[in-house]
């Protein structure tokens, strides 16, 4: 029988200790976000549909994005036991410089549309965390503005080669003059992908007021207040801003870009040159042999060719083909620090986050980006400790199994015959 007794008043008082309420609404909601998905939920509540869908959406049926995220979820870790890791070192040397974490902020276009602090918030948060920040050609803050927001940190620039080549050349020179140390030459956007959410929303730059956008704005007055009381939203590097996203991209991009363009940019650019948007092994090897400094395995966040290869699935084969001394980075689908750990274990030198950063920005401006980085840092450190590794260099393919849902038909048929 359980022995019963009257509650001790002193013991009850010990239990009745209430947490001091947080009066800062932004801090309260960000502190409650424990994952990137939590930040996404906050961002969706606080951002008009057209702006949120531009960030959250992808091309056509959005299969490329769904598959990329699923690939990271389909990971099985293999921890080592009795291997103490009381402290972990998450730092890495990448492209000739340091990063405190194995990820940087990817280039994103129209960023001030998501939240008015835009690239300044991203660059400032990157500076505080000691990680690289990448500015997009389609950014809404100038090259010089990003440099001012991150004067001592590492700034990278993402370049589209446009129909008017001289625009691209001048942007390259400006980034070099501002001290940006790495150029991401993007090759997966000869034309704009079919981003159906944007078309259905009538998304344009700047946003157009319609009955639908007004109705959608009613529960989000803070976004419209910020939008209407801050400097005009426009591309900082391009002079023409009117039209739909697809029309702007089609006007700026050029389907004729080739290795000849790469050679010209290589001559102009004095820093590290990385090719972003690589999607097969053969191109990876060819680019290595062409003398670039690295590649980013990427399908543009699923925003260009739907049903494109999954970068995370490509990673082991690419690493094997190009060798250990060539820089291989990866983006698309990263929503958890464990995703980053898995990528490093399978051969990635570095990773880039896009949507994860923008979810934080929409959820709380600069503080939201800080929260994104804090969440990912905690997940990286915890995963490393649970795997029994003290540094990124200790991660290896044996720590990870990629569980496969999408098996090529020929491979499946061959295996069946062997059995």
Image: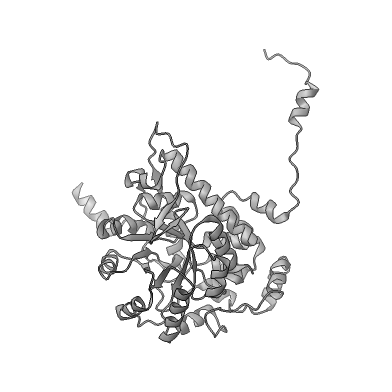
Query: x, y (%) of residue 408?
Result: 30, 58
Using the rendered image of the protein, determine whether residue 344 is visible from the camera's viewpoint. Answer: yes
- At a point 55% along the width and 70% down the height, the residue shown is 146
Q: Compared with residue 322, is residue 200 higher up or lower down, i.e. above or below?
A: below
Q: Residue furthest left?
A: 418
Front-most of residues 84 and 401: 84
**Which residue is most to the right?**
9
Q: Which residue is at a point 42% across and 49% down the rendered structure image?
A: 341
Q: Residue 293 location in percent, x, y?
A: 33, 66
Establish if 206 lies above or below 306.
below
Task: Name the image quarter holding the N terminus.
Answer: top right
Q: Residue at x 51, y 76 (%)?
A: 138
Occupied quadrant, residue 203: bottom right
| 149 lies left or right of 87 | right
Name above or below for residue 175 compared with residue 405: below
Q: Residue at x 56, y 83 (%)?
A: 241
């Amino acid at each position: 029988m359980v022995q019963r007794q009257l509650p001790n008043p002193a013991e009850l008082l010990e239990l009745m200790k209430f947490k001091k309420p947080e009066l800062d609404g932004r801090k309260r909601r960000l502190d409650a976000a424990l994952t990137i998905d939590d930040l996404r939920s906050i961002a969706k509540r606080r951002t008009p549909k057209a702006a949120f869908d531009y960030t959250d959406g992808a091309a056509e049926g959005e299969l490329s994005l769904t598959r990329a995220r699923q690939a990271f979820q389909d990971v099985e870790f293999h921890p080592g036991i009795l291997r103490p890791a009381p402290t972990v070192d998450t730092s890495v040397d990448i492209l000739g410089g340091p990063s405190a974490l194995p990820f940087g902020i990817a280039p994103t276009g129209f960023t001030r549309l998501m939240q008015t602090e835009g690239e300044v918030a991203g660059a400032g948060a990157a500076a505080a965390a000691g990680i690289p920040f990448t500015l997009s050609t389609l950014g809404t803050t100038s090259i010089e503005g990003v440099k001012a927001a991150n004067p001592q940190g590492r700034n990278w620039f993402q370049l589209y080669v446009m129909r008017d080549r001289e625009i691209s050349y001048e942007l390259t020179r400006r980034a070099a003059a501002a001290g940006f140390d790495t150029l991401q030459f993007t090759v997966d956007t000869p034309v704009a992908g079919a981003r159906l959410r944007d078309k259905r929303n009538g998304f344009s730059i700047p946003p157009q007021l319609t009955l639908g956008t007004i109705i959608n704005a009613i529960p989000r007055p803070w976004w419209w207040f910020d939008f209407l009381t801050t400097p005009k939203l426009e591309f900082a590097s391009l002079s023409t801003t009117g039209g739909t996203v697809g029309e702007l991209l089609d006007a700026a991009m050029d389907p004729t870009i080739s290795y000849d363009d790469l050679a010209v940019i290589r001559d102009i650019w004095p820093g590290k040159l990385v090719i972003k948007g690589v999607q097969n092994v053969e191109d990876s090897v060819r680019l290595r042999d062409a003398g670039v400094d690295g590649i980013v395995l990427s399908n543009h966040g699923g925003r260009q060719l739907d049903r494109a290869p999954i970068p995370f699935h490509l990673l082991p084969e690419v690493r094997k083909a190009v060798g250990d001394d060539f820089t291989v980075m990866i983006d698309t689908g990263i929503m958890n620090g464990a995703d980053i750990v898995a990528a490093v274990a399978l051969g990635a030198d570095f990773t880039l986050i896009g949507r994860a950063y923008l979810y934080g920005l929409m959820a709380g401006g600069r503080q939201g980006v800080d929260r994104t980085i804090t969440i990912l840092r905690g997940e990286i450190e915890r995963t490393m400790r649970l795997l029994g590794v003290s540094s990124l260099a200790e991660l290896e393919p044996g720590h990870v199994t990629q569980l496969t849902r999408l098996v090529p038909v020929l491979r499946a048929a061959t295996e069946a015959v062997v059995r």
